[in-house]
């Protein structure tokens, strides 16, 4: 078993909107909030895992059409989003690794077909941001830096 730490900051661009967030590693739920009220909340989790392939997931929930304001032409004027920043493994910030390797899967809150996109730090739709990684974590980091 290998011990490592995952840390990040999460926040809501509209704290009054009841956007929720779950954080998972494989089948272990690390965090669950039905309403993210902070603009920037630091989180850190100590984990112990077997060597091999693992998956970190951020799951946004509870977003409704009322959380998005559009003009008469359908252009978004204001939107509630979850922001994920400063993701780090053992205090090593992933930065570009997170952007390059994370996949954001969502269906535009039920209005379109499911899609997979790159993730640039903000979740605007209910869905999942997934990042695969392997343990030992330092070897994975070296392979992707």
Image: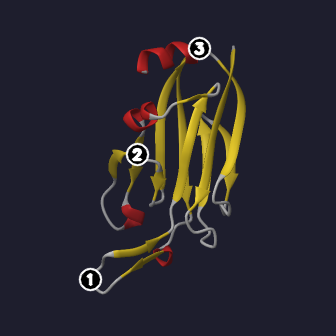
Of 76 and 24, which appears nearest the observer? Answer: 76
Q: Residue at x 47, y 55 (%)?
A: 123
Q: Mark 1 or mark 2, which is nearer the start of the sequence?
A: 1
**In this figure, what is the number of numbered marks?**
3
Residue 138, percent across and down?
Answer: 56, 15
Quarter of the image containing the N terminus? top right
Near mark 1 (Cα within 10 A), the count class, few <14, some 14-19 or many ≥20, is few
Residue annotated with mark 1: 73
Residue 138, above or below 115 = above
Quarter of the image containing the C terminus? top left
Q: CA distance from mark 3 to mark 2?
A: 26 Å
Of 100 and 23, which appears nearest the observer? Answer: 100
Kindly give the residue lying farthest to the bottom in the view shown: 72
Q: Residue at x 68, y 64 (%)?
A: 37
Labels 3, 2: front one: 2
Kindly give the residue lying farthest to the right in the view shown: 46
> What sort of colour scheme is used for the picture?
secondary structure
Q: Secondary structure at mark 3?
A: loop
Q: Residue at x 55, y 45 (%)?
A: 85
Residue annotated with mark 2: 119
Residue 113, above or below 117 = below
Q: Residue at x 54, y 48 (%)?
A: 84
Q: Mark 2 or mark 3, which is nearer the start of the sequence?
A: 3
Q: Mark 3 or mark 1, which is nearer the start of the sequence?
A: 3
Residue 68, percent across and down?
Answer: 45, 74
Residue 102, percent across and down?
Answer: 42, 38
Residue annotated with mark 3: 51
Q: CA distance from mark 2 to mark 1?
A: 26 Å
Residue 122, percent across and down?
Answer: 47, 53
């Amino acid at each position: 078993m290998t011990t490592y730490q995952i840390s990040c900051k999460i926040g809501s661009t509209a704290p009054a909107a009841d956007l929720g967030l779950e954080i998972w590693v494989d089948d272990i739920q690390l965090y669950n909030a039905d309403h993210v009220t902070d603009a920037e909340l630091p989180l850190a989790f100590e984990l112990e895992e077997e060597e091999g392939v693992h998956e970190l997931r951020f799951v946004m929930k509870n977003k409704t059409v009322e959380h998005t304001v559009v003009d008469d032409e359908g252009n978004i004027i204001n939107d509630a989003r979850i922001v994920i920043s400063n993701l780090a493994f053992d205090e090593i910030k992933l930065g570009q690794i997170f952007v390059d390797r994370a996949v954001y899967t969502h269906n535009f809150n039920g209005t379109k077909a499911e899609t997979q996109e790159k993730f640039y730090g903000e979740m605007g739709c209910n869905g999942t941001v997934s990042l695969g990684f392997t343990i030992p974590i330092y070897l994975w980091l070296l392979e992707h830096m």
